[in-house]
Amino acid sequence: MQIKMNDQPIEIFSGACVKDVLRKYSRAEWRLVKNDRKAVFDRHGHQVALDGELNGGEEIFTKSIELVKPQP
């Protein structure tokens, strides 16, 4: 199946989770997400869980945590 990660098509196995796509996309991005420096969002801007299952055709994006935290 195919998932778009940061506008780049990624071919991944059926039943893959967000973390699987993220690791295939970039080990560096994976480390940033695991270290809470970035988070993963769907095309509607909702944060998604790393263990969330994908069905194909989804678009997900990483964003810096500083960009998504509410400002006081």
Image: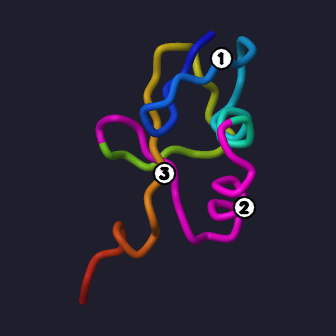
Instruction: Judge whether 66 appears above or below 31 on screen.
Output: below
Q: Quadrant of residue 23?
A: top right
Q: Nearer the viewer, residue 11 or 39?
A: 11
Residue 41 relative to residue 26: left or right:
left
Give the CA distance from mark 1 to mark 2.
20 Å
The answer to which image quadrant residue 10 occupies is top right
Mark 1 and 2 residues: CB-CB less than 8 Å, in contact? no
Q: Give x and y (percent) for residue 18.
A: 63, 36
**Residue hosting label 2:** 31
Asked if the magenta segment contains residue 33, the reply would be yes
- Write down the residue under mark 1: 11
Badge 2 crowding class, 10 Å Cα cut-off, few under 14, some 14 to 19, many 20 or more, is: some
Place of residue 39 in the rendered image (x, y in percent of width and height, measured from the top left) = 52, 58
Secondary element type, mark 3: strand
Task: Tell me the number on the disc at residue 62.
Answer: 3
Residue 59 vertical placement versus 47 (above, below):
above
Please determine whether, in this image, residue 52 is positioned above or below residue 12.
Answer: below
Query: Residue 30 bears which disc, if any?
Result: none
Q: Amino acid at mark 2?
A: Arg
